Amino acid sequence: MNLTGRKKRGDSAGFFASAMAKDILGEAGLHFDELNKLRVLDPEVTQQTIELKEECKDFVDKIGQFQKIVGGLIELVDQLAKAAENEKMKAIGARNLLKSIAKQREAQQQQLQALIAEKKMQLERYRVEYEALCKVEAEQNEFIDQFIFQK
């Protein structure tokens, strides 16, 4: 008997009624949790949902870390690309400068060769003129000698 004076049902009958109620509610999509609160989701599904939510949060955190690492890597690669481009431009500038110097030297060499040729021609003219003057001098000396001997 219970406190009200009534006969107490057997434990097996209460368990059976509770199990039947849980089955009927379960078929309707309603479930009891560990605190015996009525829930719409099955406790296993609820637990899986919580676990999935935590895994998703961990995944999002890892993706964020990955993005930071990739961002740093991209920034580093950009810096290296800029440095390589600067070195490339310096090398191109140096090569162009060397070409320019070579062209200047070639032009200077041509000018000097032209000057040498001009000076050789002038020397030849002077030699010819010298020979002509020497001939004139010899003729004049011969004329003077003849003039002196005739007297």
Image (cartoon, grey):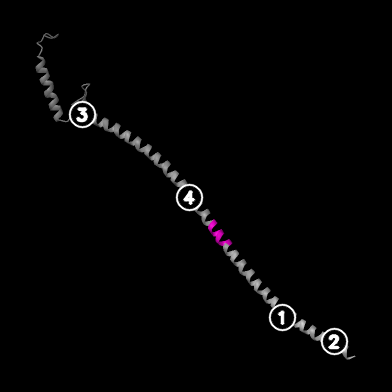
Q: Nearer the viewer, residue 73 or 67?
A: 73
Mark 3 or mark 4, which has the lower sequence index?
Answer: 3
* Residue 44: assigned label: 3
Number of residues whose C-alpha sits closer than 10 Å to that of mark 1, classed few (under 14), some (14–19) or many (20 or more): few
- In the image, 34: left or right of 24? right
* Residue, disc 2: 145
Q: CA distance from mark 2 to mark 3?
A: 147 Å
| Camera sees residue 40 | no
Q: CA distance from mark 3 to mark 4?
A: 58 Å
* Residue, disc 1: 128
* Residue 84: assigned label: 4
The amino acid type of the residue labelled 1 equals Val
Q: Which numbered disc, 1 or 2, marks the residue closer to the eye? A: 2
The image quarter in which residue 75 lies: top left
Secondary structure beneath label 2: helix
Q: Position of residue 136 (x, y in %)?
A: 78, 84
Mark 2 or mark 3, which has the lower sequence index?
Answer: 3
